[in-house]
Image (cartoon, grey):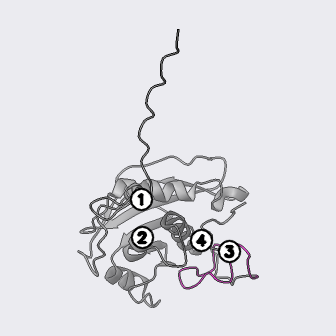
């Protein structure tokens, strides 16, 4: 008796396929609802509601409050999930056992903010972000939505770039300063200004890439 044919394989979504809004699956998972980048939005921030316990409470816990500028086409809950997954990744700042991160919608040690280029420039001043860059200063990591949407030519993969962006700007709030590429072909340190330039290093999104 011939064996029955195996069931048809389920369709696999191509993570690099672009949908009608010009977004990939990875873009959607990072919270994006549109590919357009506004130069400015409302100028008002809203806190993403909810809290998530630290995964390693035996370590020193730093609390994170995630905020999004009103008027950006972003799913705040998905953006917050991306931020926390990045910070608590095994390759993240806690890989050496020094820290773990919890999310809160109340008072927090660190605010992670997604904002339009105009508001980034305002919040980062006197640092000159020029509508292009992000910053980590005065208790807030301000991420430029232009970079969240577009990434940079220095990175082939926008997901890796977004992980770099979160880790780099939060790194400043953990007391880390900029460093240079140590050698041609080396993995770029997370505190290298990789938005400006990666070469001659290799792009990297993690404090402890392994």
> Magenta residues?
183-201
Disc 3 and disc 4 in contact, CB within 8 angstroms: no
Which residue lies under the disc numbered 2? 148
Label located before the other in sequence (1 or 2)? 1
Which residue lies under the disc numbered 3? 189
Q: Is mark 3 on a helix, strand or loop?
A: loop
Spatial CA distance of label 2 from label 3 is 20 Å
Which residue lies under the disc numbered 4? 171
Query: Which of 38/13 is in front?
Result: 13
Other residues around mark 3 within 10 Å, as few (<14) / some (14–19) / many (≥20): many
Q: Look at 63% across and 72% down and name the residue there.
A: 190
Spatial CA distance of label 1 from label 2 is 9 Å
Disc 1 and disc 2 in contact, CB within 8 angstroms: yes
Spatial CA distance of label 2 from label 4 is 17 Å
Query: Which of 40/203 is in front?
Result: 203
Q: Look at 46% across and 57% down and name the residue there.
A: 82
Q: Look at 29% across and 73% down and name the residue there.
A: 36
Q: Where is residue 177 in the image (x, y as percent from the top left)?
A: 64, 80
């Amino acid at each position: 008796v011939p064996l029955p044919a195996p069931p048809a394989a389920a369709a696999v979504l191509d993570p690099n396929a672009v949908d009608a809004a010009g977004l990939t699956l990875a873009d959607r998972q990072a919270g994006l609802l549109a590919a357009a980048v506004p130069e400015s939005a409302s100028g008002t921030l809203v806190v993403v509601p909810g809290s998530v316990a630290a995964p390693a409470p035996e370590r020193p816990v730093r609390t994170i409050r995630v905020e999004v500028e009103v008027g950006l086409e972003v799913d705040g809950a998905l953006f917050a999930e991306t931020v926390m997954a990045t910070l608590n990744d095994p390759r993240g700042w806690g890989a050496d056992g020094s820290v773990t991160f919890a999310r809160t919608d109340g008072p927090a040690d660190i605010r992670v903010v997604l904002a339009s280029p105009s508001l980034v420039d305002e919040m980062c001043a006197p640092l000159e972000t020029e509508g292009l860059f992000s910053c980590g200063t005065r208790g807030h990591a301000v991420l430029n939505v232009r970079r969240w949407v577009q990434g940079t030519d220095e990175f082939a993969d926008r997901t890796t770039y977004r992980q770099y962006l979160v880790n780099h700007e939060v790194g400043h709030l953990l007391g880390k300063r900029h460093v240079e590429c140590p050698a041609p072909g080396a993995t770029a340190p997370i505190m290298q200004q990789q938005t400006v330039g990666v070469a001659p290093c290799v792009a990297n999104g993690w404090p402890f890439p392994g």
